[in-house]
Amino acid sequence: MKTEQVVRTRTYRKYYALLQQMPGNVPVQELKETWVSDFTDGRTTSAQEMKDMEFVLMIGAMEQHINDNNPKQVKLDQHRKRVIAAIGAWLRSRNKKENIIIIKAIACRAARVDDFNEIPVGKLRAIYEEWKNKNAVSVETDAVIGGIENELAIMN
């Protein structure tokens, strides 16, 4: 019984910490009532009266809302998407198998980390530039090889 109480106390601490981090200048009391009401379909405005599943879902949605409105997180996501696009473009240009797992594995290996989300912004920029340049070089190389093949075909 005591461990359940400790867990619930920690959860409420997280709940109030998330309320403080919410973007905008909305008063905390108004935020509490709005979020709780939304996740209980208007049944209540008190977090204590919420069902456990509703509360957990609300905490997750609050975290996501904060991350989505965090400019630093948005910038990091943009860099990740650029890296994925650059590596994917190179794989396509080489007619190699391409999926998100392979692309993330290549990026992780380049950054020497185990998790794609652990790659810092500076390293993401470097990986993007490297693969963008690699793709440009392969396109130029393909053009030169294509020209040589055409000349050889004409000679024969």
Image (tube, rainbow, N blue to C red):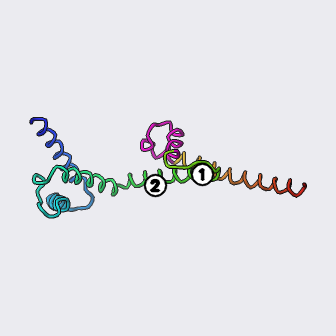
Amino acid type at image mark 1: Lys
Instruction: Give the mark nearer the N terminus: 2 vs 1.
Output: 2
Element on which disc 1 rests = helix
The quarter of the picture where the C terminus appears is bottom right
Q: Which residues are magenta?
A: 102-124
In the picture, measured across the screen, residue 8 lies left or right of residue 151, that is left
Q: Identify which residue is drawn at 28% across, 52% down.
A: 63
Q: Identify which residue is drawn at 14% across, 64% down.
A: 42
Q: Which percent across, then down, holds residue 23?
A: 27, 58
The quarter of the picture where the N terminus appears is top left
> Which numbered marker is on residue 113?
none
Confirm whether the magenta stretch covers residue 110: yes
Which residue appears farthest toward the right when viewing the image? 155
Q: In which quarter of the view is residue 32 placed? A: bottom left
Answer above or below: position of 4 versus 73: above
Q: Which percent across, then down, holds residue 21?
A: 25, 53
Q: In which quarter of the view is residue 126 placed? A: top right
**Residue tagged 1:** 132
Q: CA distance from mark 2 to mark 1?
A: 15 Å
